[in-house]
Image (cartoon, rainbow, N blue to C red):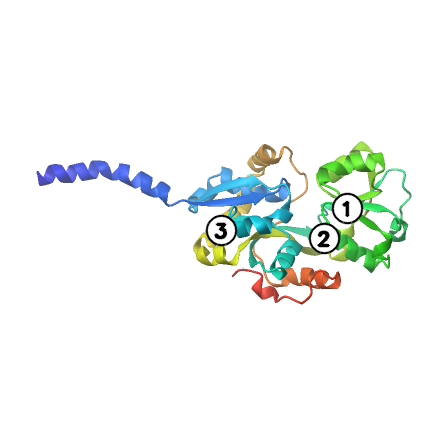
Amino acid sequence: MKRIAALACLCLLPLTMQPASAQQLTKINLAYAVAADFLPLFVAKDQGIFAKHGIDMNATVMGNPALAPSALTAGSLDIALVTPPNLLLANEGGLDLVAIAGVVRVQKTNPRSNLVTRTGENITKPSDLKGKKIGVPAINSSLDLVFKAWLKQNNVPLDQVTSVETPFAQMPDLLKSGQIDAAMSMEPLLTRIVAAGSGVRTFDVQSEVNPDFLGGFWGTTRDWATSHKTLIEEFRASLREALTDIAAHPDEAKAIEKKYIGYVDPSPLSVRVDLVPADFEFWIDLCVAMGQLHQRVDPAKVVFP
């Protein structure tokens, strides 16, 4: 009888091991934006890299990154795309968000954004923008703040240029109709605007302000990060592995990119997973200079170790 019982246990062993493996996956609710910058996320999900690291990734599109802080605080999201101004202003307002991994860097060597002016406008220097309406994705967004810093850098009074909140998708039509005179647009829409004749590239605003800075990152609440330290390490490791996979299998990566965002961006990725406090110094200085932050923040407290 003992021998029969032992054999029965051996037969059941593979069946009991399978569910245990599945139970090791921890679900993460994450929100991203539709852009090529998120290719490591897509590859990690489709190639089973997240699963290998014990993560069940539930990734959904977020139309407006400005909503991320409230969604994270409410617990409807675990991790989300956050921009530096979003985090700094949310924390000054009483929240406690931290950055856990990088998404995209804005680099002069790989420009992804540009000021496009309406076709027919004779804008050749910053001062030509006086009296003009400029479309920005959101007031006090990253693009809006950098644009205003660029105006100040070029001695253009901010009160002589009007920022108009304009969703990216509406920029081509509003430029064409003349409701805005220029727009801070990003790829791939930027190329489409120029190709359609609705606007022309004028100034590489972001690169002129800073040739290399953090554009966006994965953020969460400090409470969630503190209670999920190991999971965050696995999340970072997954993204690093995905970047290696993209470099090794570019054709497969392009197919995954097209699956998720509907096109293949010809520009190289500008992604660095690891963050350092210095990544936030530029944004802290900028937000203070623009009157958005009322006191300086210790950048070391913003990046989760």
Picture quadrant of residue 276: bottom right
Disc number for residue 114 = 1
**Along the viewing direction, whichever of 246 and 263 lies nearer the viewer:** 263
Q: Is residue 49 above or below residue 230?
A: above
Query: What secondary structure is found at the residue carrying circle 2?
Result: loop
Q: Which residue is mark 3?
A: 237
For the residues marked 3 and 2, what is the alpha-carbon distance in whole angstroms? 32 Å
Q: Secondary structure at mark 1?
A: strand
Mark 3 vs mark 1: which is more N-terminal? 1
In the picture, residue 209 is in which quadrant?
Answer: bottom right
Under mark 1, the amino acid is Asn
Q: Nearer the viewer, residue 27 or 234?
A: 27
Q: Residues within 10 Å of mark 2 (few under 14, many from 20)?
A: many
Q: CA–CA distance between discs 3 and 1?
A: 32 Å
Kindly tell me whether residue 285 is visible in this rendering. Answer: yes
User: What is the quadrant of the N terminus in the image?
Assistant: top left
Q: In which quadrant of the rendered view does residue 148 lie?
A: bottom right
Of tags 1 and 2, the one toward the viewer is 2
Residue 234 point in image, percent of width and height: 46, 51
Comes first in the chain, label 1 or label 2:
1
Image check: 76 left or right of 116? Answer: left
> Which amino acid is tagged 3?
Ala
> Where is residue 15 shown, x and y percent of the image?
27, 36
Q: Are marks 3 and 1 in contact (CB under 8 Å)?
A: no
Numbered marks: total:
3
Mark 3 or mark 2: name the one nearer the start of the chain. 2
